[in-house]
Amino acid sequence: MAERMTSAKTYLRIAAVGDLHVSKTQQVSLQPLFTQISTSADVLLLCGDFTDYGLPDEARVLAREIGSALKIPVIAVLGNHDYEAGKADEIRQILTDAGVTVLDGEATEVLGVGFAGVKGFAGGFGRGALGPWGERAIKAFVQEAVEEALKLEAALARLRTQQRIALLHYAPIRATVEGEPPEIFPYLGSSRLEEPINRYRVTAVFHGHAHRGSPEGRTSTGVPVHNVAMPLLLRTNPDRPPFLIVEVPLDGTEAASASAEPLGRPLVKSA
């Protein structure tokens, strides 16, 4: 413990996971996972899709698990599943009441490291990105992606910290959705989210959503992007707990990532 407290003066240990997909009839407790995260990290990022069907009762199950096991700050963004039942505001409030900082275009700080978060949206990547042309429905779809990117830009602009972390649900680059069927790439993220990430020289990006994607990639300017969807972490590191640890130095150098230490058995089932 003394060694961890000493090292915490020079870097922040960030744990990240997404796509928990908690149900009302959850059979496997998240408490062992959250307990290990509490002893391994200084802050936990939850990258959306906390719930399976966007129901408040599902959020309450997660809130109880968080309240009983997590002893570190928790920062989160909602995912598309959390909007399914039209109860996103209620879900956000339930998690807020449990001590979670839920971001939707806002920013926060932990030990001098800044965090900006939005859900993000779909639309595709690069030359394959959908443009605002044609039917009104297409223009509205594209505008949703634009507005999410603008919210991310505004949140990053509020930060005055040397290190900036972006927290998303949807992917900002194509690299971390590689492995999914190419036909669904446009529904997994939007490169419009990449623009503010590059402009504000973000230290690292975390997202979920792409369960069969790739764990890591970089933006066009070299910003590291981590896909921390729980099903992906379980598949790529089956002998380790499904969360990623990234060490963010407080001196401004690049963050270093490492998977959690192996345990004897999986802590949770695949979402």
Image (cartoon, helix red, strand yellow):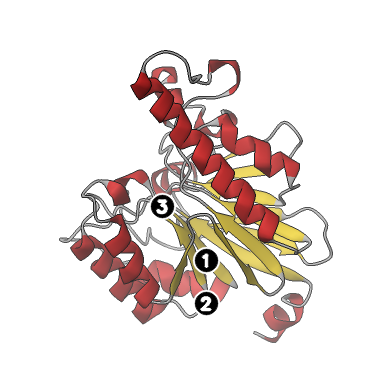
Question: Camera-side residue: 129 or 251?
Answer: 129
**194 shown above or below 1:** above
- Residue at point 27%, 57% (across, down): 22
Q: Dot 3 lies on which element?
A: loop
- Residue at the outermost top position: 134
**47 shown above or below 44:** above
Q: Dot 1 lies on which element?
A: strand
**231 shown above or below 1:** above
- Position of residue 119 in the picture relative to residue 82 (left or right): right
- Position of residue 88 in the picture relative to residue 117 (left or right): left
Q: Which residue is mark 2?
A: 72
- Give the crowd class for mark 2: few <14, some 14-19, many >=20 residues within 10 Å: some
Q: Dot 2 lies on which element?
A: loop
Q: Which mark is residue 248?
A: none
Could you tell me the amino acid type at mark 3?
Gly
Q: Which residue is mark 1?
A: 44
- Residue at point 62%, 61% (across, down): 115
Camera-side mark, 2 or 3:
3
Q: Disc 2 or 3, which lies upstream in sequence?
A: 3
Question: Camera-side residue: 81 or 226?
Answer: 81
> Where residue 47 sits: x, y (%)?
46, 53
Q: Which mark is residue 48?
A: 3
- Residue at point 42%, 24% (across, down): 139
Could you tell me the amino acid type at mark 1?
Leu
- Residue at the outermost left position: 25
> Where residue 242 sits: x, y (%)?
45, 55
Mark 2 vs 1: CB contact within 8 A: yes
> Where residue 162 sits: x, y (%)?
79, 61
